[in-house]
Image (cartoon, coloured by chain):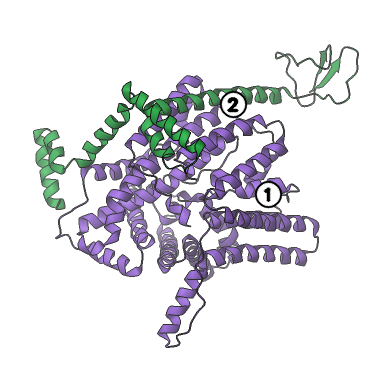
Amino acid sequence: MGQDVALSNPGEIVPQNQALATTDRVIFQNGEVEQGWEAVPRGFLREERETHYQIGRLWRALIIAAAVLALLNSGRLVTMVSGLSVGPVEDTIIVMSETWHEQMNERGLAQFAEEVRAKIDVWRAATWDDVEEELPAGEREGALLRGAQGGV
Amino acid sequence: MLFPTFEFGVFFLVVFAVGWELRRDPNWRKLFLVGASYFFYGWWDWRFVGLLVLSSAINFSAGWLLDRLGRPSMRKTVVAFAVILNLSILGFFKYYGFFLDSLRVLLETLNLERDLPFMQVILPVGISFFTFQGISYVVDVYRGHVRASHSVLDVFLYISFFPQLVAGPIVRAADFLPQLDETPRLTRAMGAIGVVLILSGLIKKMVIANYLATELVDPVFFDPSVLGGADLLIGVYGYAVQIYCDFSGYSDIAIGVAALLGYKFSENFNQPYRASSLQDFWRRWHISLSTWLRDYLYIPLGGNRGGGFATYRNLFLTMFLGGLWHGAAWTFVFWGAFHGAALGIERFARQKLNALAPPAGEEPGYITRLSRPLNRVLGVIATFHLVCFAWIFFRAENFTLASTYVTGLADWSVPSLYVTPFIAALIAGSLCFQFTPPKLAEWLARPLEYAPSAVLGLVLGLGIFLIWAAAPAGVAPFIYFQF
């Protein structure tokens, strides 16, 4: 069932504690509903507020993510912008990126990417013998046997 | 413009900011998203933007006409004409060269050599996907499954919306158009799942698929004749994982990006390698294509309504044409035909086995109950290997290489060159993820729903940083771009 919600003027926002269903009517204190105004379901307002809040939250998150990448991944930034065509704007972007990368290098932030890459390269280069050395003695025999059977 | 690039990052930031700023004015928002989608598509080649406009205009006009025509015969003519136009565009760009090459070989075989017209036709990226979306719109309007849109912008946005434009998922008009009528919303759940899907898609594509491609699959498939059975076996397992991670990674990013813009797409992959039958596999693999083929090809052909032979024929034809859709080469045709034939055999075997089962309501015996889990395990292993066998033809450049590959699988005398612990771990780890709880992404997204923006930003930023740092250098195109 719908209910009537009394508001003092058309510009007033529906109070949060007053639930408006789709059948509700908004009646202003002078007893009239101004032309062009309509009752809005409470759910709609809640969704609108939620969307507004989430856009702000995600926008801030995206900016933080971009900042993290600019700080830690400045080397990649230089690689990316170096592919730009020749021109005054492009040249400025390239110079700015290189200066930024130098700054990050001096502060040691650009090293993280190289450390991750070095770790991955160690894993990539690992052989089955390296894996066997890492294993405890008991498991090593089994691994050796499996290796021989598999021809690897 | 590829998803895992700096350009796309900047592009998405702009689209996110402006798109949501325009949310109170739906028409401006749609116009902006259409413009952004055309810019995204034109980044590859501006000349093909015209093709996208033409495809959208054909389908909008057909829908508009169907809405106004009452006579069934006229409506049938319009829908047939629209489908033929769509398929003609696809056929010209995708199959012209294939048709001429095949004709040339046929004439040579018959000693009737002729000078055939030569024309190099460039394949526009994503043409198979947006053509199928267009056909889906027209047919759905004809069938009454969706109301014909009176807004040009809606249809243009439906066909060109950038997250799914070049490699799917193939979004249905009935799923997408109603979302355009509503005020766009962004919820906690959509934001969190969007971030998780983007990260999981990037890991799948940039780390797993790219390493497997460069360090195993490309060299193994380049010349299989010099390799032994171990390399070839791991090579095809690797390709199974690579194509899954490549394509489902793209789908994950597309669904995640769409979610951040307020739109919901259905899932396109559901752990396909845990399927215990081929029928089950096709319910989990490229779901948007398999359901499209079912609804717009298998069922119009008669589906399973015509009895035994007609059902097998329809099944085979559907998969055969599904194979051809993937690419203009006989290897793709064989891949589709193999799946069609195998699905038919599986259906036949299931019917025979069902006839032997105890009558409904009767308590199954101990042996039956004990054998069920074993049957399932055997089913998963058998299905995976059948799918892998078919992948050899899907990946190989030609039949000669594919047959060399298949025969080489029996030769285990040559020591392995490519099976390293790193590659083995990538394959084994990826296959293990096929057996995790099905809604893992939603479960991972739950803590992010209420996380502050700083935490969300750090998760996203550090996640992308680690993926970029761990991934091989360069950005490889997605496999499904060629289709």
Element under disc 1:
helix
Residue B271 location in percent, x, y?
41, 45
Q: Chain of mark 1?
A: B
Per the image, the residue denoted by label 2 is A55
In the image, B16 versus B386, the foreground residue is: B16
| In the rendered image, the vertical position of residue B4 relative to residue B145, given as above or below | above
Residue at image x 80%, y 60%? Answer: B69
Q: Position of residue B38 (x, y in %)?
A: 60, 47
Query: Under tag 2, what secondary structure?
Result: helix
User: Can residue B378 be seen at all in this image of the molecule?
Assistant: no
- Residue A74 is left or right of residue B227, and the answer is right
Vertical comparison of B48 with A128: above or below: below
The picture's colour for chain B is purple
Task: Report the side of A37 relative to B375 (left or right).
Answer: right
Residue B125, image x and y in percent?
52, 55
Say what amino acid the circle numbered 1 marks. Val
**Residue type, label 2:** Ile
Which chain, by letter, is green? Answer: A
Residue labelled with disc 1: B155
Vertical comparison of B225 with B108: above or below = above
Q: Is residue B94 visible?
A: yes
Q: What is the distance, in whole Å, between disc 1 and disc 2 at their CAs?
A: 26 Å
Q: Is residue B306 left or right of residue B199?
A: right
Name which quarter of the figure residue A39 lies in.
top right
Q: Chain of mark 2?
A: A
Q: Residue at x 41, y 32 (%)?
A: B464
